[in-house]
Image (cartoon, rainbow, N blue to C red):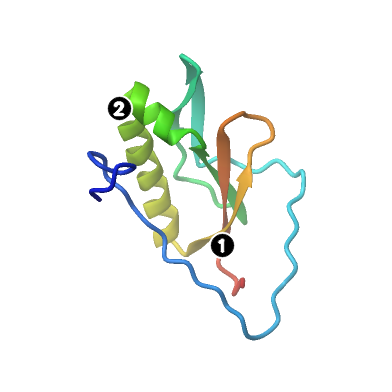
Amino acid sequence: MSDHMNAGIPSDRFVVEWRIKGECPERQWSEEVLPMALETGMADGFYFPDNTQLFHENEKILIPVPGNFQDIKKRDFELALKWRESTKEVFVHYLSKGWIVTDLIRDITAENQYLYLLEKEKGYC
């Protein structure tokens, strides 16, 4: 993409679908500990993707993403590129196996980090 936010770095997009007819199960975020499909570390004030975990079989998993991606891109382009490559790897893996993204949650334990919630597809709205 050639806009100023994405220029010079690969960018993937989700197709979002809202199912507006029929009953939707009520979802609530709980405090349960869910496995991370991407482990992170911290260096120079920024989270970095450390290890991808492509073996989870739980009903729900989390994929962390930085909330300050543009700051990362300005200060450390290679780190921004690593984030894009790492998240693409885990999303492609799990989405190709039938998982769906059902939520984006602010990580209350880590500043400037968000968590995509992935669930095994069961007809969610």
Viewer-nearest residue: 71 or 24: 71
Please tell me which of labels 2 and 1 falls first in the chain. 2
Name the residue nearer the viewer: 52 or 74: 74
Measured from the top left, where is residue 37 in percent x and y? 50, 42
As helix, strand or loop, the secondary structure at mark 2 comes to helix
Name the residue carrying label 1. Answer: 120
Q: In this view, does 28 lie to the left or right of 92?
A: right
**Is residue 49 shown left or right of residue 6?**
right
Identify residue for label 2.
77
Q: Residue furthest top?
A: 44
Q: Nearer the viewer, residue 61 or 1?
A: 1
Q: Residue furthest front?
A: 4
Residue 28, image x, y percentages: 75, 58
Question: The C terminus is located in which quarter?
Answer: bottom right
Residue at the location (62% across, 29% down)?
Answer: 110
Residue placed farthest to the bottom in the image?
21
113 vs 91, nearest the viewer: 113
Mark 2 Cα within 10 Å, few/some/many (few <14, many 20+)? Answer: some
Q: In this view, does 66 lie above or below 101?
A: above
| Residue located 58% across and 78% down the image | 19
Q: Position of residue 122 (x, y in %)?
A: 60, 71
Residue located at (69% from left, 76% from top): 24
Marking on residue 10: none
* Mark 2 vs 1: CB contact within 8 A: no
Q: Where is residue 8 shown, x and y percent of the image?
A: 22, 39
* Real-space CA distance between mark 2 and mark 1, rounded to the nearest whole angstrom: 33 Å
Side (left or right) of 106 relative to 15:
right
The residue sitting at 34% across, 52% down in the picture is: 12
Identify the amino acid type marked 2.
Phe
Say few, some or many: other residues with alpha carbon within 10 Å of mark 1 (under 14 / 14 to 19 / 20 or more): some
Query: Which dot, 2 or 1, sits closer to the camera?
Result: 2
Q: In which quarter of the image is residue 5?
A: top left
